[in-house]
Image (tube, rainbow, N blue to C red):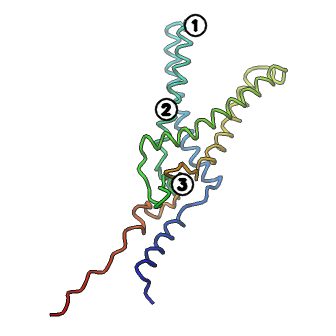
Amino acid sequence: MELSISESYQANFQKEVNMELEVTWGRTVRVWWAYVWRLMLITSIIGFGLGLFMGVLGSPPQLANIILNLTGIISIAISFAVMQRILGKDFGEFRLVLIRKEVNTELEVTWGRTVRVWWAYLWRSMLITFIIGFVMGLLQAQGAFNSDLPIQLVGIIISLAFSLVVMKMILGKDFREFRLVLIRKDDKSPNKLGLESPNFPSPKPSSP
């Protein structure tokens, strides 16, 4: 028995909904690493360049403070650019896309939508980093570490670990207009998969 037009359309829609993948730790690591290594590479290059510049100028205290603040601002701007880079990225098994909630179609990665995803990740990461820094400072004040190097290393490792947790928190998150989801790569994007308007049969010419 043939499906009616509405039943066929609903079946296609259901197929579209089911192609969303579960946000596992393995998939989260791949998305997180794509973000982290780009961010670390670019900020390291910029930090090296600024450090070289300060060394040439003899690093006056006032200039050092200005460059330090500038480095922080640049790092935040770079993190935004990197976030936009990975949205829509192909990860082999899956793609990271923005899906409109009402009709389940893929949305363009605009600057405005990137800001919302980026900010959701950034403020959580900054909050956790602040808490970690505060706790580490207390431990150092009580003599838990003999030098600055171990506490800095431990702080970096813990911050990276929690940034992975934050990435898992925002994958699949509802951003009102859209959701950030993982879709299976071998399927097309949602706006090209099974959600086209149903083709109604052309009316037959009436008999003379």
Quarter of image, res 149 = top right
What distance separates the C-alpha of mark 2 from that of mark 1? Answer: 26 Å
Instruction: Report, in whole angstroms, how far the alpha carbon at label 1 lies from the one at label 3.
Output: 46 Å
In depth, the one of 207 and 17 nearer the eye is: 207
Going from the N terminus, do you reach mark 2 or mark 1 first?
A: 1
Q: Where residue 85 sits in the image (x, y, percent)?
A: 46, 42
- Circle 1 sits in a helix, a strand or a loop, which is it? helix
Write down the quadrant of residue 21 in the picture. bottom right
Q: Amino acid at mark 1?
A: Pro
- For the N terminus, the quadrant is bottom left
**Secondary structure of the residue carrying numbered label 2:** helix
Give the amino acid at mark 2.
Answer: Ile
Alpha carbons under labels 2 and 3: distance apart = 23 Å
Residue farthest left in this picture: 208
Residue at mark 1 = 61
Residue 50 sits above or below residue 88 on the image? above
Residue under label 3, please give it.
181
| 111 in relation to 174, above or below | above
Q: Is residue 195 left or right of residue 70?
A: left
Marked residue nearer the N-terminal end (2 or 3): 2
The label on residue 78 is: 2
Residue at x-position 55% and y-position 38%: 119
Q: What secondary structure is marked by label 3?
A: strand
Q: Reply above or below: 57 against 203.
A: above
- Residue 89 horizontal/vertical position (percent): 47, 50
- Where residue 15 sits in the image (x, y, percent)? 50, 70
* Residues packed near mark 1 inside 10 Å, few (<14), some (14 to 19) or many (20 plus): few
